[in-house]
Amino acid sequence: MPHTLARVSVLVAVLTVLLTGCYGLYPPPEKPLSPVPIIPHQKDVKVFAKGDTLADSLYLPMYELAVPDYAGAMPLEDFEYLAQSYGLDAVINVSNRPLRGSTRYLYSSSMLYGLGIIYYDSLDYVRWFVKDKWTYKLPERDGTSAQEDSAQVPARLVYRAHFDYRSEERPPREGEPNEDYVRYVRNYSADFLINAIENWRFKLSASTNQLVKRRYYQNGEKVLTAAFTYDRKGRIGQIDLQHHQKEPDQETIELIYDSTDRVIEKNITVDGELTGREFLYYDNLNRVDLTKYYQRQGEDLVLYLQTEYDYYEPIDFYPDSLQVENR
């Protein structure tokens, strides 16, 4: 699951679009019973009636589900479709009564009810969800030219960005995010420009259904508009940024890919002049491990910010008792 700006179609395909004028509103995400990332899939899903014995008793309750149950209905297929859409492993406790204490469903004689779950053993996929980004500022005297193969350079931590299970960046407990982080790391990242949905609206192409624009709001006011241009392979090749409240008001990000369709470099220009360059480095799981941002200073590109990525682990979602056992 490589970190690449090319995978926009997956995001768009699972959205329910509520159109308001030219831009669509992302629907509010449905809150799961357990705060765990989900990925829709096409795997087989088992459905267990109430009282059935499960092969694995260690699971996370995720969603209450309900499907029609009348002549001609196909409740098993409907449960499987819902479970796949929600990224679930199984549906359990299926009966003709809502779950005890349910606040989502009222009883209906023409419905079947169940609980969608995810097994602990299948949580490996959470390792591709960003948990934290640690951004370091390089002292000016230690700046290194982009042409050099620079190693780790002494640096000062300026900001830690934390992401929740939905891949949404959370605000700091106090104050505002670091200005350099926002300006040169967040605003050029796929996590912000592509994946985040809080405070964003979007626009799709009428002919191709591709994402063509996204607009970011704060306190009801426009802050940033991102326009996407695609290359011949259907990958995003360029992102034009329009800043509505600060200078420079226009920036362009050119994306450079390697032979495996991973973004490895971003060139940032203002009015056609190169102002910065970001290099992306990947780990053995094909995840972004490190980014280095070089800033234009005179005729040189100087290493200015370095950001290290941390990802969630399955144990992050275990209850306390299981965490102790797995340490």
Image (cartoon, helix red, strand yellow):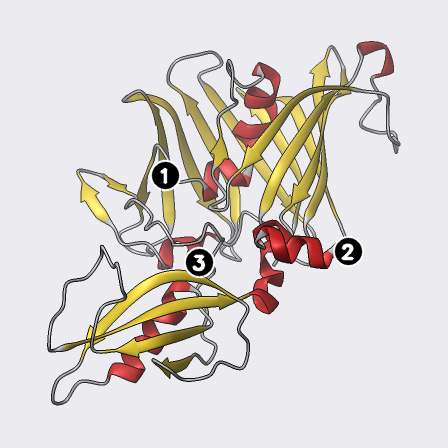
Q: Amino acid at mark 2?
A: Asn
Which is more toward the observer, 282 or 92? 92
Secondary element under disc 2, as helix, strand or loop, is: loop
Residue beneath the point at 37% across and 18% down: 244
Which is more toward the observer, 300 or 45? 45
Could you say which quadrant of the image residue 55 lies in?
bottom right
Q: Which residue in the protein does label 3 denote? A: 10
Mark 1 against mark 2, which lies toward the viewer?
A: 2
Mark 1 against mark 3, which lies toward the viewer?
A: 3
Which is more toward the observer, 163 or 48? 48
Answer left or right for 173 relative to 145.
Answer: left
Q: Amino acid at mark 3?
A: Val
Could you say which quadrant of the image residue 296 lies in?
top right
Q: Amino acid at mark 1?
A: Lys
Residue beneath the point at 26% across and 58% down: 101
Using the image, tell me which numbered label, if any, was put on residue 213: 1
Question: In the picture shown, does residue 15 fall above or below 247?
Answer: below
State which quarter of the image contains the N terminus.
Answer: bottom right
